[in-house]
Structures are given as structure tokens and as C-alpha cells.
Image (tube, grey):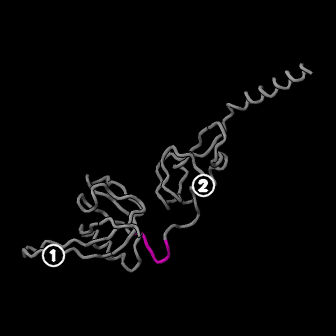
């Protein structure tokens, strides 16, 4: 009986030893992907991990290509199914508008996806000496993406979600270099 017990324990420990270091490939993000962006093959890779982890198996990498990021994906993040979606995150009646701003036209600590902002059109200096007040173009918009401008130092490129009927005014203010964004409460 003792010999059987020793042999059984030896077999159990042998099995646990061989499977303890067993690694399986999972999908990992290699470059940043903003919320709502389509995930491309170049944004993904696989990595071998050990242990019990909830992730998309490496063999299913291609099933993620073409999906959209449900959350902001950062490099070296192990990808889980809940992080991707096939739904366009742009709500009905809203559109995405690109806005370029210089330093001083957004809060000093910058803006991040999900921030609520008010879009202002800054007055053009008329030389009259009479101070003018900025005009509110959109009372509430949502930052969809925010990146430093690779061409102009200190400038920021933003994508905003705005009501469709106000998109032209936002684009016009941005094109004139007169757009400023004020961070407002999310409520």
C-alpha cells in the first residue's frame, strides 16, 4: 500500500511539475489604439504566458483584426474579449470633428478621451481696442482622441464628438485657428 501511495504521489507531482511551466500564446497589443479605432494587424502580436489568465488565445488573433477598441488599448496589454467591440462608438446624431489647437487653447494638463469640453470661437483681433467675448460654438462635446501635433511643437490634435448640426462651426473655428476648449463637468 505504501509503495502505491509513493508511486501515486510521485506521478501527481511529476504532472504538476511539467504543467507548472507550460506556456500558451495570447494576443497582446503592440501600439496604442484609441477608443473606437479599428484594430489593425500591425497593432497586435502574441506572447507566451504561463498560468491561468483570461485572454484571447494567440490562435484567435485574426478574429480581433477589424474590430474596434472598446477601451483605450496601451502597448504590452494582454487583450481580453471585453476590450474589443464590433459597434461604432459614435452615438446617433453625433459626428467626429478634427480640431487643432495651440498651447493655451486647452487646459495646461491636456485633454484625454472621454473628457467633456465646451468649444469656443476666439474673437479675431480687430484693432478697435474694444474687448470681445469668445462665442460658445458647442456647449458640450466629448473628446474622442487627443494627440500631440507632430508638426507644430506645443500644439494638440483632437477629435471631438459633437452634434452633427454644429460640426461645421467647430471645423470653421479650428480652421481659422480660433478654437479653444474648456473642460467642463461630465454631467
Residues shaded magenta: 91-96
Q: Residue furthest top?
A: 3
Residue at disc 1, secondary structure = loop
Location of residue 182 by image quarter: bottom left
Asked if disc 1 and disc 2 are in contact, CB closer than 8 Å, the reply is no
- In the drawing, does residue 86 fall left or right of residue 113? right
Q: Which residue is mark 1?
A: 132
Q: Which residue is mark 2?
A: 64
Q: Earlier in the sequence, mark 1 or mark 2?
A: 2
109 part of magenta stretch? no
Relative to 114, say whether 28 is above or below.
above
Relative to 107, say whether 90 is above or below.
below
93 part of magenta stretch? yes
Residue at 39% in and 80% down: 165
Q: Residue furthest front?
A: 2
Q: Residue furthest right?
A: 1
Q: Nearer the viewer, residue 66 or 167?
A: 167
- In the drawing, does residue 176 fall left or right of residue 126? right
Quadrant where the N terminus sits is top right
Q: Residue furthest bottom?
A: 165
| Badge 1: residue crowd in 10 Å (few <14, some 14–19, many ≥20) | few
Amino acid at each position: 500500500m505504501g509503495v502505491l501511495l509513493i508511486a501515486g504521489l510521485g506521478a501527481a507531482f511529476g504532472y504538476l511539475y511539467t504543467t507548472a511551466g507550460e506556456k500558451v500564446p495570447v494576443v497582446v497589443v503592440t501600439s496604442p489604439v484609441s477608443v473606437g479605432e479599428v484594430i489593425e494587424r500591425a497593432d497586435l502580436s502574441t506572447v507566451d504566458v504561463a498560468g491561468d489568465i483570461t485572454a484571447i488565445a494567440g490562435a484567435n488573433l485574426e478574429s480581433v483584426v477589424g474590430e474596434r477598441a472598446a477601451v483605450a488599448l496601451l502597448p504590452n496589454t494582454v487583450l481580453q474579449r471585453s476590450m474589443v467591440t464590433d459597434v461604432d462608438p459614435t452615438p446617433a446624431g453625433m459626428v467626429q470633428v478634427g480640431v487643432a489647437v495651440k498651447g493655451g487653447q486647452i487646459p495646461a494638463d491636456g485633454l484625454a478621451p472621454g473628457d467633456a469640453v465646451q468649444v469656443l470661437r476666439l474673437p479675431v483681433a480687430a484693432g478697435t481696442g474694444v474687448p470681445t467675448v469668445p462665442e460658445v460654438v458647442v456647449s458640450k462635446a466629448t473628446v474622442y482622441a487627443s494627440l500631440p501635433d507632430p508638426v507644430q511643437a506645443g500644439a494638440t490634435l483632437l477629435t471631438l464628438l459633437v452634434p452633427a448640426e454644429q460640426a461645421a462651426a467647430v471645423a470653421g473655428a479650428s480652421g481659422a485657428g480660433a478654437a479653444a476648449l474648456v473642460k467642463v463637468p461630465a454631467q
